[in-house]
Image: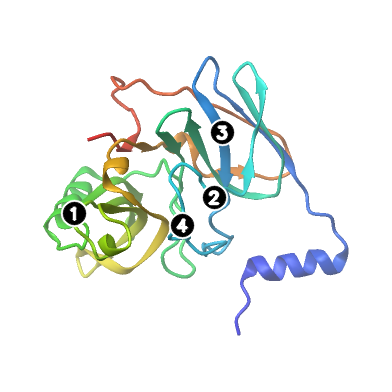
């Protein structure tokens, strides 16, 4: 049985009696309104493995976060004690709105993490987008939202929706599914090839009419926040629909 580096580190610290450090994270939204909750995910351990299994019964309106911030007023939300690690934030609106951060975990062992701000060359992005568009999928909507990497690997945050008839119809008439994954394309023999392995962020099943009312966007400014033992402040302004760099993701349709 193999033990990950994160487990070894935790065992060593516990055996040595070393207290686990925690730090304060403040999210400053300025004059933003209509926010009902801000949560934090620690999705991946230091090896890039998921910290917990994906729950197929998860609800869009109830993210299964690891920590919830306290509203301090004046647009400031505070996580008092976050243990060290990388965090992605999620902001829930008072309506059907969800804005979420992410970073790219390793798909293969010993590969590096990529930050959510990672980019790639235009021709590479166009090739991967075209390749995904031409491939056959179970889902009828497969949308590459963001991609970034280096000369050896490019990772893609992909939104997958099935809002046509599914095998779940017998259990939930009019059901639809949505999930988000990170795919990887590897540079092999002078070309880019999709790796069979992926990393799954989430999966939800809900009535398709309900899904089509939701806004679920992804923003790099809310992802890959490194916490150590010092306080961190994230200043975030909700984008307007007309902003050229507005977050990508699910919009009502």
Residue 212 place in picture, x, y as percent = 27, 39
Question: Between marks 2 and 4, how big is the CA–CA gap?
Answer: 19 Å
Query: Which numbered disc flags the more N-terminal residue, 4 or 1?
Result: 4
Q: Residue at x 27, y 47 (%)?
A: 208
Marker disc for residue 64: 2
Q: Are marks 2 and 1 in contact (CB under 8 Å)?
A: no
Front residue of this view, candidates 166 and 187: 166
Could you say whether the residue bearing mark 2 is in a helix, strand or loop? Answer: loop
| x then y, percent, for residue 165 | 19, 58
Would residue 195 be found to the left or right of residue 74 on screen?
Answer: left
Q: Where in the figure is residue 170, as x and y percent of width and height?
A: 27, 64
Q: What colour scheme does the image use?
A: rainbow
Image quadrant assignment for residue 51: bottom right
> Within the image, what quadrant is residue 155 found in?
bottom left
Mark 1 lies on a secondary structure that is: loop
Closer-to-camera residue (135/250):
250
Residue pointed to by mark 3: 37
User: In the rendered structure, are the residues bearing label 3 and label 4 in contact, judged by CB atoms less than 8 Å apart?
Assistant: no
Q: Secondary structure at mark 3?
A: strand
How packed mark 3 is, by other alpha carbons closer than 10 Å (few <14, some 14-19, many 20 or more), is some
Q: Is residue 153 visible?
A: no
Sooner in the amino-acid sequence: mark 2 or mark 4 = 2
Q: Say which residue label 4 marks.
A: 105
Q: Nearer the viewer, mark 2 or mark 4?
A: 2
Label 3 vs label 4: CA separation?
A: 25 Å
């Amino acid at each position: 049985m193999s033990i990950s580096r994160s487990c070894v580190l935790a065992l060593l610290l516990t055996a040595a009696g070393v207290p686990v450090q925690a730090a304060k994270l403040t999210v400053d939204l300025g004059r933003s309104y209509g926010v009902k909750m801000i949560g934090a995910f620690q999705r991946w351990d230091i090896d890039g493995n998921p910290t917990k299994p994906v729950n197929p019964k998860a609800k869009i309106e109830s993210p299964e976060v690891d920590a919830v911030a306290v509203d301090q007023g004046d647009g400031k939300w505070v996580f008092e004690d976050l243990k060290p690690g990388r965090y992605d934030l999620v902001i829930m609106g008072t309506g059907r709105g969800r804005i979420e951060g992410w970073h790219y975990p390793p798909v293969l062992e010993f590969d590096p993490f990529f930050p959510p701000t990672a980019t790639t060359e235009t021709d590479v992005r166009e090739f991967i987008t075209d390749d995904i568009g031409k491939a056959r999928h179970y889902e009828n909507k497969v949308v590459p939202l963001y991609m970034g990497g280096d000369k050896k690997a490019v990772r893609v945050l992909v939104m997958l929706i099935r809002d046509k008839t599914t095998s779940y119809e017998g259990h939930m008439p009019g059901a639809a599914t949505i999930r988000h994954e990170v795919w990887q394309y590897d540079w092999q023999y002078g070309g880019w090839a999709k790796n069979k392995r992926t990393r799954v962020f989430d999966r939800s099943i809900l009535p398709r009419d309900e899904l089509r009312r939701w806004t679920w966007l992804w923003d790099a400014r809310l992802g890959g926040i490194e916490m150590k033992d010092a306080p961190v402040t994230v200043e975030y302004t909700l984008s307007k629909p007309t902003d050229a760099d507005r977050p990508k993701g699910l919009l009502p349709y």
